[in-house]
Amino acid sequence: MRILLVEDHLQLAESIAQALKGAGWSVDVLHDGVAADLALSTEEYALAILDVGLPRLDGFEVLARLRDRANTTPVLMLTARSEVKDRVHGLNLGADDYLAKPFELTELEARVKALLRRSVLGGEKQQRCGELVYELATRRFILQGNALTLTSREQAVLEAMIARPGRVMSKEQLASHVFGLDEEASADAIEIYVHRLRKKLENRGVRIVTFRGLGYLLEEVSE
């Protein structure tokens, strides 16, 4: 899952990004509101973390523009402002959660997990395709009772596919979930990750089907 982090304090941004990456998420880091508005209008994210006090466009304006586009991406606001009116203003604009600075990184991670659980899985703790189970809280894939060992790229591909049951996903769509803004998105590399995943899923009740010219579909294997 890709997360957008927008924070103009460079050291804090780096600390947050490292913590989130250490938890297994892909993180794009930006430092001003104009860049954030552009990224949110052109890229797909599972979650956005917005600082309120951003240069060029503040976090409230970025959030307002996002919601004006009918974009429902979950948003966690960060702020040094402790006034209730500011929190209320952010929530009224469409923020999903609010975290005042200073905060512990462990609390931020917990809130990120909770927001993703509500948005991606509709509050459920698991996503399932046949005998493949994805546990959002631990970000583990369990297949026939055993944990799958996956690289971070394989994990990102499989997360994207299991979150969209019955939907064919193109290489470009999968690449958008795997590669960050500072990386060269390679549709060809997706073929490699899909090939590796197929070998790990082979003869275990679930498979990835290719629809030539369209993309890939994760499906249960019927007996």
Image (spheres, rainbow, N blue to C red):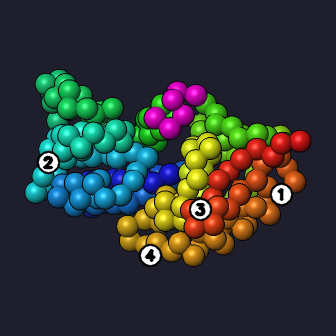
Taking the spot 61% from the left edge, 42% from the top edge, the residue there is 165
Q: Magenta residues, as a range? A: 119-124
Q: Position of residue 29 (x, y in %)?
A: 34, 60
**In front here: 112 or 41?**
41
Instruction: Using residue 162 as the reference point, say whether residue 32 is left or right of it.
Output: left
Q: Is residue 121 magenta?
A: yes
> Within 10 angstroms of label 3, few (less than 14), some, or many (20 or more) residues?
some
The vertical placement of 66 against 189, above or below, is above
Q: Position of residue 14 (x, y in %)?
A: 36, 60
- Identify the amino acid type marked 4: Glu
Task: Compare marks 2 and 1 and give the one earlier in the sequence.
Answer: 2
**In front here: 205 or 112?**
205
Task: Compare marks 4 and 1 and give the one earlier in the sequence.
Answer: 4
Q: What secondary structure is marked by label 1?
A: loop
Q: Position of residue 175 (x, y in %)?
A: 50, 65
- Identify the amino acid type marked 1: Glu
How far is disc 2 from disc 4 in space, using C-alphas? Answer: 29 Å
Task: Compare marks 3 and 1 and give the one earlier in the sequence.
Answer: 1
